[in-house]
Image (cartoon, grey):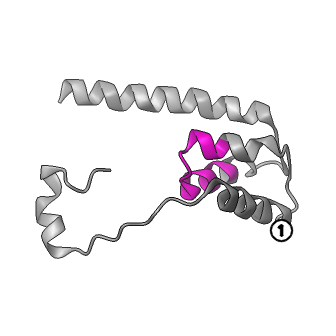
Amino acid sequence: NNPYNPNLKKLRTISLMINVPSISSYKLIRRLNYILSNEDISYDVNIMSVLHEKFSGDIRQCINNLQFFISDTSKITMDDLKIINKTMFYSNYYFESMQKIF
C-alpha cells in the first residue's frame, strides 16, 4: 500500500495521511498473549514471534490470522502456521501475476 502511487493522487488531495509507526515485537507479542489468554485459547508461545516475523509487526494481520485459526477450535499450534505459509505463497503469486498481466 504505497500512498504515493500515482493512482492515489486524487485521494491524497482530499484525505489526511496518518503515519502509524510499527509496534515493537515485545509490545505486539505481549498484546497477542493478552488477547489469547482472555479468550481462553491455548497456544504455543513460539507462535507469537513467528507471527510477528511473518507479518512484519502488522498487528492487524496477526489478529486476523489468529481469528481465522480459532474460528473452529480453542487451540493454535505451529502446524497452523504452515497454512499461513501456503496462503501467503499463493496470494503473493497471484498479485505478482496480476501485476505482470496489467
Identify the residue shown where x is 85% and y is 43%.
Answer: 44
Look at the magenta stretch and give its main secondary structure.
helix
Q: Residues within 10 Å of mark 1 (few under 14, many from 20)?
A: few
How many numbered marks have been drawn onto this rendered protein structure?
Answer: 1
- Give above or below for 18 relative to 83: below
Q: Position of residue 10 (x, y in %)?
A: 11, 64
User: In the drawing, does residue 45 fall left or right of residue 83?
Assistant: right
Looking at this view, is 35 or 4 the one in front? Answer: 4
Looking at this view, is 101 or 6 the one in front? Answer: 6
User: In the drawing, does residue 7 fall left or right of residue 86?
Assistant: left
Q: Which residues are magenta?
A: 51-66
Identify the residue shown where x is 85% and y is 63%.
Answer: 37
Q: Position of residue 59 (x, y in %)?
A: 58, 57
Image quarter of the C terminus:
top left
Residue under circle 1? Answer: 38
- Which amino acid lies under the numbered mark 1 shown in the image of this protein? Asn
User: In the drawing, does residue 2 fall left or right of residue 75?
Assistant: left
> Helix or strand or loop: what does disc 1 sit on?
helix
User: In the drawing, does residue 4 fall left or right of residue 46?
Assistant: left
Q: Position of residue 80 (x, y in %)?
A: 74, 35
Q: Position of residue 89 (x, y in %)?
A: 50, 26
Identify the residue shown where x is 83% and y is 68%.
Answer: 38
Identify the residue shown where x is 63% and y is 56%.
Answer: 63
Residue 53, quarter of the rendered image: top right
